[in-house]
Image: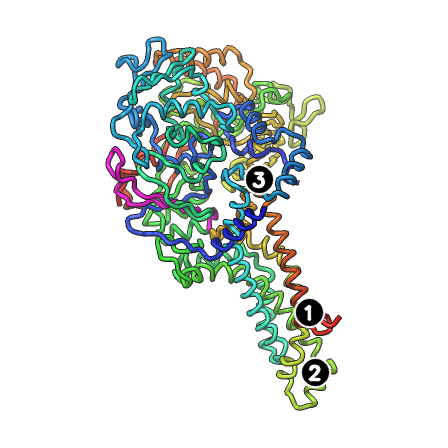
Amino acid sequence: MVHLPKGGPADVYAADPSATPEAIERMKEIWGLDQPLHVQYGRWVTRLVQGDWGRSYVERREAIEVVADRIGPTLRLTGAALLVGLVAGVGLGVLAGVSRSPGVQHAVRVVAVLGMSVPTFWSGAIVLLVFSSYLRWIPAGGVGTIGGDANLLDALWHLAAPALVLGSVYVAQWMRYVQAGLESVADDDYVRTARAKGLNRTRALLRHGLPNVLLPLVTVLGLELPRLLSGAMVTEVVFSWPGIGRLLHGSLVARDYPVVLGTLIVAGMAVLIVNLITDLLYGVLDPRVRYA
Amino acid sequence: MRNARRSLARLLVASVLTVAPMAAAQTLTILFPQEPGSLFPHFDLLSLAHEAQDLLFDRLFAVDEQGAYLPVLAAEVPTVANGGISADGRVYTIRLREGPTWHDGTPVTSADLAFTWRVITDPNLPIPTRTVWQDIVSIDTPDARTAVVTFGDTNVSFLGAASFAGAFLLPSHLLQDVDDLANAPFHRAPVGNGAFRLVEWQAGSFLRFERHDAYWDGAAHFEAVVIRIVPGSEAQRTVLSRGEADLVLQVALTELPFVDGLDAYRRISVPTFANWQLWLNNEDPVLADARVRRALVHAIDRETIADALLGGLSRPDDAILPVSHWAHADDVSRYPYDAAAAERLLDEAGWVRAGAGRARDGQPLVVELINIAGQADRLQVVQAVQAYWRAVGVQAEIREVDAASFVPTLSGGDFQSAYGFFGEGQEPVWNLWLGTNWQRYGNQEALGLLRAYGVTVEREARRELAVAFQRQVAEDVPVIVLAPRPLLAVVRADLQGYAPTTTSSLWNVHTWNR
């Protein structure tokens, strides 16, 4: 797929009229890009199974190193965004699900609509403008203070805004899941039985309804990971965050095939791992699955 | 395989846990919108890579604000008068300055110059351009301070090539025994001879340089330089509004109103030798007619585009060498905005009005305009051109391509017109005309002037040849010059010493102060 658009790494690398077509062709020969696509692919697969991911045309080092440099920041960002989405989403969903106050219901609905309809490139820009440019509460992007000491607080200070922006999309979505789930189980037999035994509505829903509601959310979490990674690309650009998303975008633009493929392998592995964890968690959370 | 897994695991753990610590005192912070891939000179044509390399490496010569050559690693600028250039322009004798050392303390010698030439011309290395250097037949080094550079024929471009941004010497003592220079660690951990040395490179975030205390021209005033990678315009604005950068290079034209509102910064615009221009495919059936090409220039209000969309930083011209260039031609054919003249020329060429457009022999007049996608300021310009052309009946269709597709599209001839910029150096080598010739200009008489230019030693005679060529090009209109493209930077108001030239922003960074 990445070979389909016109232009390759040599064209990007030598994007200047001073680079003659002969020089560009010579670069393609040196890099093996003059070979048929199936030959190039075969060579790449052969090397990959031997642990060689190829070399970046742009950074001139092992593609595995290039990708690995970006995994840490991406894990920090997506992990924090997931946490924000889960904590705030489940919290607000529970509030909306157990509350009968019209004011709470409306407020939660507004949050849901805003969260799902505001794109992260816009919310990120607004957050930077208000909280960094004007109020100076947060830094102007990056993963740490350049010139400062490395410490956890500084890292969290830099992480907070991009994580909130990226996680805000999931707050709304997961809140709606939890709210709808709690409303759907409110009249189920086991909740009514709990209430008949003396629990009030809120406690019955939290103690007996919520665990059942959270089960499908675990599945959704696993399915959302690819979207989370693609959403991170935009957030990473807005907040100058050196993650996988920005790397993938830059590598696609530069036709840096080994890095593109390496990034996709890592993203694919992440999806597989999260799905595996999801399946295992399902067994832990739902005794019926475990015993089956 | 096991080692690769362990390596990945170690990198992962380190990557997750590491947040960079750095010293802050007297640090110069420069914002880059894009990260250089490699700092190995000659391997990368990205201008930002050249700017970063300027911190690490010195050139043989520099070009000052007035366009004059200055000796840097060389002890003097060779001329025919001082015996540095042979009368036939084939042999250059370069005498190196006493004192410059590599960052490891090894002296810079003539062997480094000879080694650099061998690297640039090594056919097994993916070097994107070998212009001028490939015409050298030998470099003799009679002593450590002298290099005798011999060309096969008269060559007038060597000083220009040796002062070009990116034309840096390489340390032979470190690299001559390296088997695979294309993938050497030197790309990310270079050892230079400039005012600063690279001490840390956090991918995607920043590069940090420390002062080279033994620098031959005196240690820099700043203790450190940080190149901070900030790709998003919102983040760049935020950094500037917080006063966290000293210098921003390659500022988008759309950011100028914002920058002008900042008290702590000033913007600097310096003429370069580049033009914003439209390449016209001279072999295209529609555009092969010079009357059509002249009509297309007349149809565009270049003054308005320069003022409204190019920041009002330069005045449109019809000569391909900007007015700042020593060989600029004043008396060339002029094509002021004149829609009536454009319509008349199109009528003469047989393209007559047909409704809102024009047609000839039943074929509508359509001109496709290629643009590199993703940059708002570029898109605004091509949309303006599209509107001006439509006003005279030319159906202009914009095709946006990504940067990687742009070069093969133009070099393959799969275009009618395309928007971009191009500039010659201090000493033009005319690659756009004698080399790639994207516009497919076929006037052999005019191109013959350029071939004569390349073997003419006397500078005034070269200027006359360049002027004659510019006159012919202005007559033929193989490209449409919209306006000169200046170097545009945003600088902290209290930063002293910043004096960008046509070839570099950072050439004198060791003299800067705050």
Instruction: Establish whether labels 2 and 1 are both on one chain.
Output: yes
> Circle 1 is placed at which residue position?
A283
Q: Which residues are magenta?
A: B208-234
Chain for numbered disc 3: A
Residue drawn at point x = 42 percent, y = 45 percent: B201
Front-most of B34 and B307? B34
CA–CA distance in space, label 3 to label 1: 39 Å
Kindly report which numbered mark, 3 or 2, lies closer to the viewer in this rendering.
3
B366 displayed left or right of B78? right
For disc 2, the neighbor class at 10 Å (few under 14, some 14 to 19, many from 20) is many
For mark 2, give the secondary structure: helix
**Would residue A231 be counted in the magenta stretch?**
no
Q: To which chain does the residue with label 1 belong?
A: A
Q: Is residue B233 a member of the stretch shown in magenta? A: yes
Q: What residue would you read off at disc 3?
A: A54
Q: Which mark is residue A191?
A: 2
Q: Is residue B497 above or below residue A121?
A: above
Report crowding for label 1: few under 14, some 14 to 19, many 20 or more residues within 10 A (C-alpha): some
Q: Which mark is residue B234?
A: none
Q: What's the image's color scheme?
A: rainbow
Task: Give the image location of residue B415, x and y in percent.
Answer: 61, 28
- Quadrant of residue B357 within the rendered picture: top right
Please provide percent x and percent y for residue B112: 36, 26
Q: Residues within 10 Å of mark 3 (few under 14, many from 20)?
A: many
The answer to whether residue B230 is visible is: no
Q: Amino acid at mark 3?
A: Gly
Q: Tell me whether marks 3 and 1 sit on the same chain.
A: yes
Q: Residue at x 40, y 27 (%)?
A: B273
B393 or B510: nearer the viewer: B510
